[in-house]
Image (cartoon, rainbow, N blue to C red):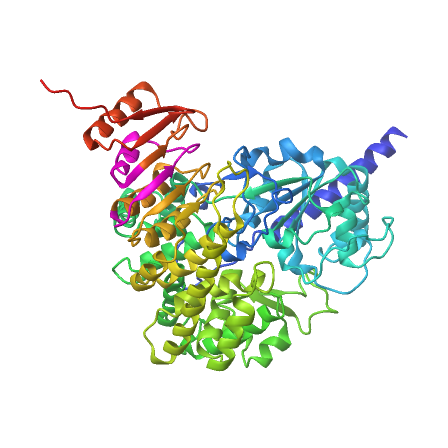
């Protein structure tokens, strides 16, 4: 009896290990974004392993509509904002801390590293992890749980599949199901999915709902990833018990990956030195690219731009980086692997139409018919923009949904949205453009612009081009931007009481400011600065460097006084405060009150630099970085502030260094 049980365990263990090995084989086929541009190191073992910063956050209790499609580089603004006391999480702690919860949500912007983190999670967890993409689940067929997680995905013999599923059922606590990219599903989980047994055939949305709710495999752990706006569509009873928000890379990790991508051979010190010099040049000549680089995907794009683009570092916006990517592909020698010279410009209108129609239909996955209708062939796109998956291998996709042997999708949704913006700018008629901008692209947040927001940002960037056929659209677009901005400003109010949540109006303003930044126009920045409300309360908004820079570019043109400028609990560091500090110094107008409390500014001199622009009050309570978050000014810092106040001799100006404790200019004594 013992030997029989032991042999059975061995059979089950061998079956599940064979299944996991098969999964690993196919997950290693990473998408190559630039097949004709070498931006990878030759020694993958030496490539730095870094992860985005993460925090445990409250997506559903904050009351904020999440719309990270507005954020090409960072899940902020209209995305869920971590509370000031949100718990920072290390990558290795995700399953260690939260596996017992049974259901974890991993949320972040496009390109923030959700999928990569999940793949690494599967390798490092010490558990049996099953990695499943929502983009592969868009089918109508009813399946049992075994068919859903094993039969349709792995080309194994029936006995191995059966034994593997038995192992899963008997070892649920050792299993983690990683469901990646809920925003890429064409369906949504129903609020009341039918109860089911392991053998009950269900629609895919009901299978996923039962798996997430614990009705099926109740002791297993589910990790679900998504853009935030799709996570909010999950019914209350099916929402993750723990929500983890992915931020950008740290500057240190960004530099590590940047240098590695720029270095063709990690053993050549000269190459590393050149890469580090290039990073230093960007820090000096184009610091705004650093914000882009902190997003893992856009870091790759930016490296390619720096290595193979114009000699000058003139890719100052996300749109210009993508423009350079297209130019690289245009210049590539034989990108299709043939003797024929191929010019990507010939198919850009077709790609743009394909992307626009797919976005309009709320999908990123396209099939054989979509490709044919756009007059594109697999040969046109396979080495350029689209990544092709073969359904005949390992039964990755349902044959009942996709005609032919493959389905297609852009290698990243940002490319998809870039081409959709190209359609809007170059192909859509002027009348159609005006109607679209008015009724769709600038519709209320939470409506159509859940899927069009990032397209809007790329549209703003494309309309910087001086081409004659874009001028009419540019005038109408930016008239609408200013109108929207003015409307939001008229709604803003600054509460005297301390806020505990971000003001949605200011979240919307920041989103528009990032659109305006993408246009990169000093004239537009100047006009927008006049529309800024006299009281600006950005409290509880965790400002990224991108947002700080976008806000500062407008602020520096402000000619009239701002009565209150409040940055309470905005996670200001010396890096993002640098942009704000320089804008305050440059602006012609003054500031009545400047609130910097509860932040992480590194140097007291940075605050001293702006004191001459403040008339009445600076709140500097717990605004300095320390071993823990937020620190009071120490005696030396108070002395430095006091010296600066004495130098300025503004009798009205008070600096609050502790609650209710103020310092002011001391009268000069005569000798």
Report the residue at 63% width, 74% height from top: 368
Report the residue at 33% width, 29% height from top: 655
Is 28 a magenta residue?
A: no
The answer, for residue 293, to whether it is visible in the render is no
Q: Quadrant of the N terminus?
A: top right
For the residue pair 633 and 265, the one nearer the viewer reads as 633
Region of the chain picked out in magenta, as a range = 586-615
Position of residue 19 relative to residue 651, above or below, is below
The answer, for residue 143, to whether it is visible in the render is yes
For the residue pair 250 and 327, the one nearer the viewer reads as 250
Residue 657 sits in quarter:
top left
Q: Position of residue 269 (x, y in %)?
A: 29, 42
How many numbered markers are drawn? 0
Is 601 a magenta residue?
A: yes
Q: Position of residue 396 (x, y in %)?
A: 68, 60
Question: Please, which residue is most extreme toward the left here?
Answer: 671
Q: Position of residue 213 (x, y in %)?
A: 77, 44
Q: Quadrant of the C terminus?
A: top left
Q: On the picture, is 175 further left or further right than 281?
A: right
Q: Position of residue 41 (x, y in %)?
A: 40, 49
Report the residue at 38% width, 77% height from top: 470
Q: On the picture, is 43 further left or further right than 666?
A: right
């Amino acid at each position: 009896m013992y030997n029989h049980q032991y042999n059975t365990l061995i059979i089950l263990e061998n079956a599940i290990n064979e299944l996991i090995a098969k999964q690993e084989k196919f997950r290693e086929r990473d998408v190559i974004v630039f097949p004709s541009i070498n931006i990878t190191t030759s020694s993958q073992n030496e490539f730095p392993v870094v992860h985005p910063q993460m925090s445990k956050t409250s997506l559903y209790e904050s009351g904020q509509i999440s719309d990270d499609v507005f954020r090409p580089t960072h899940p902020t603004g209209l995305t869920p904002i971590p509370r000031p006391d949100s718990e920072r999480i290390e990558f290795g702690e995700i399953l260690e801390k939260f596996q017992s919860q049974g259901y974890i949500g991993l949320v972040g912007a496009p390109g923030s590293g959700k999928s990569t983190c999940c793949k690494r999670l599967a390798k490092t967890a010490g558990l049996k992890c099953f990695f499943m993409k929502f983009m592969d689940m868009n089918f109508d067929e009813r399946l049992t749980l075994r068919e859903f997680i094993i039969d349709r995905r792995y080309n194994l013999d029936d006995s191995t599949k059966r034994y593997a599923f038995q192992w899963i059922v008997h070892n649920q606590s050792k299993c983690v199901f990683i469901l990646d990219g809920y925003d890429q599903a064409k369906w949504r989980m129903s609020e009341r999915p039918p109860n089911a047994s392991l053998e009950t055939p269900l629609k895919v949305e009901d299978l996923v709902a039962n798996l997430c709710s614990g009705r099926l495999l109740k002791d297993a752990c589910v990790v679900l990833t998504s853009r935030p706006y799709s996570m909010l569509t999950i019914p209350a009873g099916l929402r993750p018990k723990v929500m983890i928000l992915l931020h950008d890379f740290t500057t240190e990790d960004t530099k590590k990956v940047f240098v590695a991508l720029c270095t063709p051979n990690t053993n050549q010190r000269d190459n590393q030195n050149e890469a580090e010099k290039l990073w230093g040049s960007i820090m000096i000549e184009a610091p705004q690219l650093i914000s882009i680089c902190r997003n893992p995907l856009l870091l790759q794009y930016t490296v390619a731009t720096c290595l193979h683009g114009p000699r000058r570092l003139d890719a100052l916006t996300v749109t210009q980086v993508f423009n350079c990517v297209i130019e690289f592909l245009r210049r590539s020698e034989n990108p299709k692997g043939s003797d024929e010279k191929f010019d990507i410009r010939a198919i850009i209108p077709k790609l743009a139409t394909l992307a626009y129609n797919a976005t309009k239909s709320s999908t990123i996955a396209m099939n054989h018919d979509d490709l044919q209708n756009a007059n594109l062939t697999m040969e046109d796109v396979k080495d350029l923009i689209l990544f092709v998956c073969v359904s005949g291998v390992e039964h990755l996709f349902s044959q009942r949904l996709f005609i032919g042997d493959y389905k297609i999708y852009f290698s990243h949704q940002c490319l998809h949205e870039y081409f959709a913006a190209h359609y809007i700018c170059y192909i859509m008629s002027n009348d159609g453009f005006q109607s679209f901008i008015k009724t769709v692209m600038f519709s209320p947040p939470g409506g159509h612009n859940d899927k069009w927001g990032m397209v809007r940002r790329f549209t703003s960037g494309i309309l910087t081009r001086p081409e004659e056929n874009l001028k009419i659209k540019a005038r109408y677009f930016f008239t609408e931007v200013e109108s929207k901005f003015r409307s939001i400003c008229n709604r803003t109010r600054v509460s005297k009481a301390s806020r505990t949540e971000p003001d949605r109006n200011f979240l919307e303003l920041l989103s528009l400011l990032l659109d305006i930044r993408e246009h990169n126009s000093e004239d537009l920045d100047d006009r927008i600065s006049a529309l800024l409300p006299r009281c600006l309360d950005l409290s509880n908004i965790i400002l990224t460097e991108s947002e700080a820079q976008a806000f500062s570019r407008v602020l520096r043109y402000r000619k009239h006084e701002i009565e209150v400028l409040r940055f309470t609990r905005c996670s200001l560091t010396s890096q993002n405060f640098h942009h704000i500090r320089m804008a305050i110094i440059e602006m012609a107008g003054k500031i009545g009150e400047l609130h910097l409390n509860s932040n992480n500014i590194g140097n007291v001199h940075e605050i001293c630099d702006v004191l001459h622009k403040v008339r009445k009050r600076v709140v500097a309570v717990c605004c300095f970085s320390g071993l823990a978050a937020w620190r009071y000014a120490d005696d030396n810092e108070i002395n430095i502030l006091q010296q600066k106040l004495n130098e300025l001799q503004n009798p009205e100006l008070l600096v609050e260094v502790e609650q209710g404790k103020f310092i002011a200019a001391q009268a000069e004594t005569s000798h």
